[in-house]
């Protein structure tokens, strides 16, 4: 029998593969002396060769992803590494003369070089210290066989196990080989969990040993539906895994019929079942999965995994690409939602004690008007070419909405003066309790709502969305959350504007019918969930949905 490690399942599915520990931390450098210095010198040669190869492939990769100029840093690192006089020879001397082991000698020499540069008066020179630190870390990672590896390119299937994954770790992952994710930290609506769900990768959090080296290389079964990791499964367990997976695949096959069916209740009330995406390429995948449109394009993912900010033109092309794939279906693009658990390398932010309550989303873009205006211009230009709608995240007061709209109107006027007149629908997310409470006021000011249950739940219940320690208290079905949703949907119905929902609850079969009963007409979710939700809603009348809503909010 294998070793069962229990956690919480945040993305459904089953996987069987070897565990690969992912860690950004280096293990401590051993200090024991080299027992056979010549052997350590030979090891040094291997490590330097591997380092050079890694830098070469990093350079090529970076040219492809970010362009020549950004990639140049890796060429500079290659030059440093090839300098025998200050690298190879002194490290060999440390090994031979001071009997230091290879890793300790690399560590010492690179630290000394970094220190030397750091202490120089010339700013340019002292900045080079960071290059030596970078190369030292790369070489130590190789020397210590540590796996702070590049998870964007793997050569075999793996279940990634980590302390925690950031959204940018998750977007960088090699989708062809990563079959599952197990972490110690992280909640159900942490952005890495959301991405895992949209990619259909099983994800289990709350695995205490996830980052322990002991699991490295062991075969394991991950069950994202039930929330466990079974390490070193025996033959019977592998057999059962295969049976369950076959069953799951049969269920998926059955749902394929619903890809092209209309989205409506059993009594014919028309609905929209849309997809949440993070990149333009996912728009085409969403259409193939049966999406009626995109209810949420998390535009911040265009800004991640890179060291600079995308230009207006780059963004415009990205939105246009998504519109083209949608062939007239709606595309709701949310303006940048950075802060909370999402960071941007190109936008250093001050440390905050409570980042989810801090300079996040609309607050951050309003504080960086150039960034905001560039995105708005790109969106407005793209809106001339398809069914694009603009949505503001995390609005908490009517004044904030008015300021955001004023900036949008200025950019609209500037474009009109340049000869492009556009007027796309403008909506807002309802994800802060104050916005839900004032939904009737907001409904007069926007063309549509989209309820963000992920944040609405955390802000209503004062339970951080990605904190495993309070995961049991994070309840999107809490009557207080549901009442705020009902209030919002009713305000939208009364004002005659559509009310959508793009939080994770929209794709929850236990709740989706109740939201329809409350007046939500568009549900946007991970593309993987579309057919199941369409099938379910098609089997219920609107009246049945309303009864479910009333029962859940305690009105019946
Ligand atoms: C939400 O809060 O429900 C939402 C959809 O936004 P995000 O998950 O990106 O914060
Ligand atoms: Mg949100």
Image (cartoon, rainbow, N blue to C red):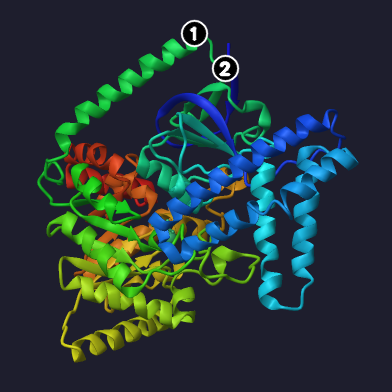
* Label 2, residues with CA under 10 Å away: few <14, some 14-19, many ≥20: some
Q: Secondary structure at mark 2?
A: loop
Residue 34 percent coordinates (x, y): 84, 33
Above or below for 133 versus 313:
above
Q: Is residue 7 above or below residue 29?
A: above
Q: Is residue 275 left or right of residue 393?
A: left
| Left or right: 8, with 101 as reference point | left
Q: For mark 1, give the secondary structure.
A: helix
Please name the residue that numbered disc 2 is placed on: 232
**Residue 528: quarter of image:** top left
Toward the right, the furthest residue is 98
Place of residue 251 in the rendered image (x, y in percent of width and height, measured from the top left): 26, 25
Q: Nearer the viewer, residue 288 or 35?
A: 35
Determine which residue is flagged by label 1: 235
Identified at 42% across, 47% down, the residue is 194
| Disc 1 Cβ-to-ligand 1 distance below 8 Å | no
């Amino acid at each position: 029998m294998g070793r069962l490690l229990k956690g919480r399942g945040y993305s459904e599915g089953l996987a069987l593969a070897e565990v690969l520990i992912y860690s950004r931390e280096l293990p401590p450098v051993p200090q024991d002396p080299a027992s056979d210095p010549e052997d350590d010198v030979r090891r040094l040669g291997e490590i330097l060769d591997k380092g050079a190869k890694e830098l070469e492939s990093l350079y090529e990769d970076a040219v492809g992803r970010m362009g020549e100029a950004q990639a140049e840093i890796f060429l500079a690192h290659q030059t440093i590494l090839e300098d025998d006089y200050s690298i190879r020879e002194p490290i060999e001397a440390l090994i031979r003369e001071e009997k230091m082991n290879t890793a300790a000698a690399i560590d010492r020499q690179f630290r000394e070089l970094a220190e030397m540069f750091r202490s120089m008066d010339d700013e340019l020179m002292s900045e080079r210290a960071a290059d030596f630190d970078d190369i030292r870390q790369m070489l130590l990672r190789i020397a210590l066989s540590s796996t702070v590896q590049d998870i964007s390119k793997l050569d075999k299937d793996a279940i990634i196990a980590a302390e925690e994954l950031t959204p940018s770790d998750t977007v960088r992952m090699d989708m062809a080989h990563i079959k599952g994710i197990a972490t110690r930290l992280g909640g159900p609506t942490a952005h890495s969990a959301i991405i895992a769900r949209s990619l259909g990768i099983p994800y289990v959090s709350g695995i205490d040993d996830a980052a322990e080296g002991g699991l490295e290389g062991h075969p394991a079964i991950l069950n994202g539906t039930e929330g466990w990791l079974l390490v070193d499964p025996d033959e019977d367990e592998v057999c059962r895994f295969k049976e369950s997976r076959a069953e799951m695949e049969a269920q998926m096959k059955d749902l394929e019929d619903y890809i092209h069916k209309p989205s409506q209740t059993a009594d014919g009330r028309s609905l929209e079942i849309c997809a949440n995406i993070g990149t333009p390429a996912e728009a085409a995948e969403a259409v193939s999965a049966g999406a009626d449109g995109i209810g949420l394009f998390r535009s911040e993912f265009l800004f991640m995994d890179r060291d600079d900010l995308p230009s207006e033109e780059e963004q415009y092309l990205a939105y246009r690409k998504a519109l083209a794939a949608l062939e007239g279906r709606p595309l709701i693009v949310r303006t940048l939602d950075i802060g909370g658990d999402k960071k941007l390398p190109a936008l250093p932010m001050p440390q905050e004690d409570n980042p989810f309550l801090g300079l996040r989303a609309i607050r951050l873009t309003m504080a960086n008007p150039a960034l905001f205006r560039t995105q708005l211009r790109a969106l407005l230009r793209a809106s001339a070419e398809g069914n694009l709608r603009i949505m503001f995240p995390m609005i908490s007061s009517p004044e904030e909405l008015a300021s955001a709209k004023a900036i949008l109107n200025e950019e609209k006027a500037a474009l009109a003066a340049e000869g492009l007149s556009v007027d796309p629908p403008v909506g807002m997310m309802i994800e802060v309790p104050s916005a839900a409470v004032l939904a009737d006021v907001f409904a007069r000011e926007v063309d549509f709502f989209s309820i963000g249950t992920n944040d609405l739940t955390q802000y209503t219940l004062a339970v951080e969305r990605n904190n495993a320690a309070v995961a049991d208290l994070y309840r999107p079905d809490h009557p207080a959350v549901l009442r705020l949703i009902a209030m919002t949907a009713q305000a939208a119905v009364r004002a005659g504007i559509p009310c959508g929902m793009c939080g994770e609850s929209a794709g929850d079969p236990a709740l989706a019918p109740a939201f329809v009963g409350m007046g939500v007409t568009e549900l946007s979710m991970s593309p993987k969930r579309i057919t199941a939700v369409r099938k379910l809603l098609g089997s219920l009348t609107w009246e049945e949905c309303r009864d479910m809503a009333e029962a859940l909010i305690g009105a019946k």
